[in-house]
Image (cartoon, rainbow, N blue to C red):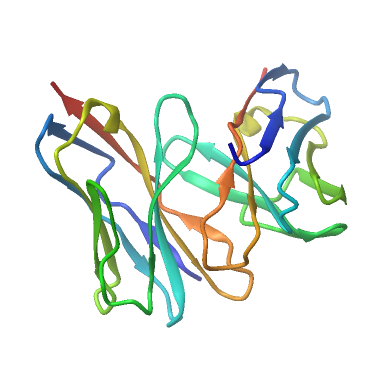
């Protein structure tokens, strides 16, 4: 069975600085998709970025980028120029298999200091 | 917004009572999901549906049942609520089995006392 591990329960970053959130996963599949979701205090789940496993190029969305290392089964999220509004829980998620249900890590709580 | 609503948003219920949570979508997506979120556990899949009357169990399905009689509605029932089912419940929808993420509802906070 696939698993997703986020080893950092909490992280902190200074406003305008860069922070990297770690995620590793375990799978025997070759075709799958990886996601980062953001959950602010409002509780809403917001898709931040997605990566197709067959693409070598790392995905980027404005200040958010990933470092996808397929061989190492690593999928970290880098947030550049951190803003107060980036403070949230961040979940790494994996999607593959015949049904393709999303499997989530336990989350990393990111605090942004002014 | 993606057109997915959950009701109620908050609920307090007593141990042993049945509870039904509703998820309604206006996107005509085929796939619908129920997750629960607990501190230290992330989101865990309870049940999912891949079409009308087609449902299957997820990772934490014990004590829960679901029904989907129409494309737009997916109901989650706690047959006899227990304190361990105190949680935040999220519904999600998807129009693709794999290559896109889900769109989530705003969640239901359920407290069982």
Q: Is residue A88 above or below residue A78?
A: above
Q: Is residue B69 left or right of residue A89?
A: right
Q: Nearer the viewer, residue B67 or A9?
A: B67
- Tell me which corner region of the image, top left, top right, bottom left or bottom right, holds residue B25: top right
Residue drawn 26% across the image and 72% down it: A57
Q: Is residue A46 above or below residue A53?
A: above
Residue drawn 75% across the image and 30% down it: B81
Residue B102, percent from left and from top: 56, 52
Q: Is residue A83 above or below residue B52?
A: above
Q: Nearer the viewer, residue B23 or A10?
A: B23
In this view, which residue lies farthest toward the right?
B69
Residue B35, percent from left and from top: 61, 45
- Tell me which corner region of the image, top left, top right, bottom left or bottom right, holds residue B108: top right
Q: Nearer the viewer, residue A70 or B85?
A: A70
Total numbered circles: 0
Dividing the image into 4 quarters, which one contains the C terminus of chain A? top left
Residue drawn 69% across the image and 19% down it: B11
- Tell me which corner region of the image, top left, top right, bottom left or bottom right, holds residue A53: bottom left
């Amino acid at each position: 069975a696939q698993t997703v591990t986020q080893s950092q329960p909490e992280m902190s970053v200074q406003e305008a600085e860069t922070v990297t959130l770690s995620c590793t996963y375990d799978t025997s599949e070759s075709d799958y998709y990886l996601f980062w979701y953001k959950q602010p205090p409002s509780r809403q789940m917001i898709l931040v970025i997605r990566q197709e496993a067959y693409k070598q190029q790392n995905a980027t969305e404005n200040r958010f980028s990933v470092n996808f290392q397929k061989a190492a089964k690593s999928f970290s999220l880098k947030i550049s120029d951190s803003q107060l509004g980036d403070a949230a829980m961040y979940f790494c998620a994996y999607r593959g298999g015949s049904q393709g249900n999303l499997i989530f890590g336990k989350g990393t709580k990111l605090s942004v200091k002014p | 917004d993606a057109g997915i609503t959950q009701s109620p948003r908050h609920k307090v219920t007593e141990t042993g009572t049945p509870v039904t949570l509703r998820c309604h979508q206006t996107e005509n997506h085929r796939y619908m999901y129920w997750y629960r979120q607990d501190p230290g556990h992330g989101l865990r899949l309870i049940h999912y549906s891949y079409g009308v009357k087609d449902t299957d169990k997820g990772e934490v399905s014990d004590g829960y049942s679901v029904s989907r009689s129409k494309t737009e509605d997916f109901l989650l029932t706690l047959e006899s609520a227990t304190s361990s089912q105190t949680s935040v419940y999220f519904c999600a929808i998807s129009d693709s089995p794999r290559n896109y993420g889900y769109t989530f509802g705003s969640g239901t906070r359920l407290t069982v006392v």
